[in-house]
C-alpha cells in the first residue's frame, strides 16, 4: 500500500509540473496566439516537448500503475 501511495505522489508531482509548465508557456505565447494560431501551436509544442511533455506522460502512466497497485492491495489491508 505504501508503494502505491509513494508512486501516486510521484505521479501527481510529475503531472503538476507538466501542467504548470504548460500554463506558463501558454501565458507567454498569448500574443502569438492572437496573431497566428499555427505559430502558437508550433511554439507550444517546441517549448513543451523536451521535459514537460514526457514528465506529464510518465506521470499519467505512473498514476495508472499506482491506482492498480492501491486497488490490488486494498483487500489485503482490510
Image: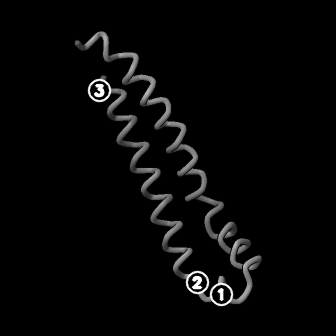
Label of residue 30 in the image: 2
Residue 39 in picture, x, y percent from top left: 75, 79
Closer to the camera, 76 or 46? 76
Q: Which residue is mark 3?
A: 2
Mark 1 Cα-neighbour bin, 10 Å: few <14, some 14–19, many ≥20: few
Return the disc, 3 or 1, that comes first in the chain's sequence: 3
Is 38 placed above or below 56 here? below
Mark 2 Cα-neighbour bin, 10 Å: few <14, some 14–19, many ≥20: few
Residue 28 in picture, x, y percent from top left: 54, 82
Mark 3 Cα-neighbour bin, 10 Å: few <14, some 14–19, many ≥20: few
Label 1 and label 2: CA atoms lie apart by 7 Å
Label 3 and label 1: CA atoms lie apart by 47 Å
Residue 70 in picture, x, y percent from top left: 37, 24
Q: What is the quadrant of the C terminus in the image?
A: top left
Q: Which residue is mark 1?
A: 34
Picture quarter containing residue 61?
top right
Disc 1, disc 2: CB below 8 Å?
yes
Q: Classify mark 3: helix, strand or loop.
A: helix
Amino acid at each position: 500500500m505504501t508503494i502505491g501511495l509513494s508512486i501516486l505522489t510521484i505521479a501527481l508531482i510529475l503531472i503538476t509540473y507538466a501542467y504548470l509548465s504548460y500554463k506558463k508557456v501558454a501565458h507567454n505565447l498569448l500574443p502569438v496566439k492572437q496573431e497566428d494560431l499555427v505559430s502558437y501551436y508550433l511554439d507550444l509544442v517546441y517549448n513543451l516537448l523536451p521535459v514537460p511533455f514526457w514528465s506529464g506522460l510518465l506521470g499519467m502512466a505512473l498514476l495508472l500503475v499506482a491506482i492498480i497497485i492501491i486497488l490490488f492491495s486494498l483487500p489485503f489491508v482490510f
